[in-house]
Image: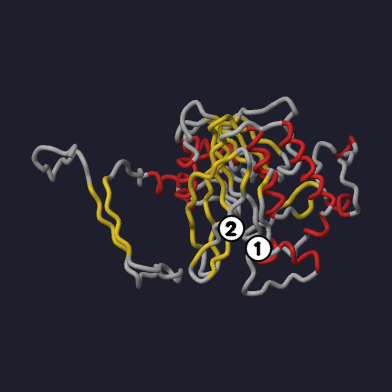
Amino acid sequence: MFLQGRVNLKNPDHNFWLMETDENETNNGLPPVVKRRIFFGREIGGADRKLIPLYQLKTRNYLGPTAMDAEMAFLMANQAQAAPGKLVYDPFVGTGSILVSAAHFGAMTMGADIDIRVVRDGRGPDCNVWSNFKQYGLPMPIGLLRADNNLPPWRPGLKEVFDAIICDPPYGVRAGGRKSGGRKLLKGIVGPYTVPDDKRADHIPSTAAYTLVECVHDLLDLAARMLVMGGRLVFFYPVLREDGSVETHFPEHLCFKLVATSEQMLSSRYSRVLLTMVKTSLYTEELALAARIKHLEFRENHLKWLENGNLHSLVFSPADAESGDSKVSKESKPKYRGKYV
């Protein structure tokens, strides 16, 4: 036994915890605990609870409808192992909540968003993404881009620059996903369009619906190309709860190993799971070609994937759009399966 000597209850070198869940326990209307469980273990670390009131959203300078809760953002940054000297990227940066948590742990940060009004303008010179970092005395992001996750701006030769990618992809709960396209894409013109010179200064590109299936495919391909070996991809993935259990088949990619899943129950029927993946294989030319083919398939079949924007059809039953039926039965489960490449 490695523990020797007398027990010191006032200033112990080791703390042990006994935790118990009651089988009748409920939490704010969420599903009850399935069975009584007992956990015993040695404390090896603890959270800095003082961070939560300091960073709570109600005191934040600049907020949007999808701002990540501060406590959750810190959990995501910890899962990504954000630390000094590391570069963290959020491709759906919004008002910067996730990057704020990564910057707190000393990481360099960078973000992108499809809405140029969010990353460039905010609500004025003293109420924008940059002012959120200034509010806490944190290092400013290296850059904030207006970029489309479906059309990444990186030049072909640029790869393996990020140590972690942390994000909350749009899946239609508070804001539906958008990608570049609009009317031209709906008419079958999948190439870029030209912006007249006299409109370049204040032009806001048109967009089209962006389903979760396509969004996650693009995210995994981006991470496979741009993360260093051993780098981490941390993102939320929505799931349906059936009979008290949660869907256990999550997106896969040949370059990644899934190392952690953490469920956050949203209601009796819906949850989202925080997935933590580690890059274990190099992104090869074969994977790049397969990803490009899949990307073109998504774009050519864009109309078949358009949904009406609610959580049921947009996330859990994209196949219903092909028959024009947007209704979802109680037995519906996520329709997309298979490996992402």
Q: Residue at x 51, y 47 (%)?
A: 60
Residue 46 image position (x, y, % from top left): 33, 44
Q: Observer-nearest residue: 122 or 288? A: 288
Marks 2 and 1 sit apart, C-alpha to C-alpha, by: 8 Å
Relative to 194, is 157 on the left or the right? left
Q: Quadrant of residue 117?
A: top right
Q: Amino acid at mark 2?
A: Pro
Q: Secondary structure at mark 1?
A: helix
Query: Which residue does the image show at 29% across and 61% down from the upper left?
Result: 20
In the picture, the disc for residue 185 is none
Rendered view: 113 above or below 241: above
How many numbered marks are there? 2
Residue 258: x, y in percent? 53, 45
Which residue position is annotated with label 2? 238
Residue at image mark 1: 316
Instruction: Check the picture and name the quadrant holding the C terminus.
Output: top right
Residue at left 47%, top 48%? Answer: 70
Mark 1 Cα-neighbour bin, 10 Å: few <14, some 14–19, many ≥20: many
Asked whether 331 or 11 is in front, the reply is 331
Looking at the image, residue 75 sits to the left or right of residue 156; the answer is left
On the rendered structure, is 148 left or right of 258?
Answer: right
Observer-nearest residue: 131 or 264? 264
Q: Which comes before the other along the chain, label 2 or label 1?
A: 2
What is the x, y in percent for residue 91?
Answer: 64, 41
Q: Is residue 51 left or right of residue 315?
A: left
- Give the secondary structure at mark 2: strand
The quadrant where residue 303 appears: bottom right
Q: State the image coordinates of residue 64 (x, y, percent, origin top left).
A: 60, 51
Assess whether mark 1 and mark 2 are in contact (beta carbons under 8 angstroms).
yes
Packing grade of label 2 (10 A; few <14, some 14-19, many >=20) is: many
Kind of residue sitting beneath label 1: Phe
Q: Residue 132's quadrant in the figure?
A: top right
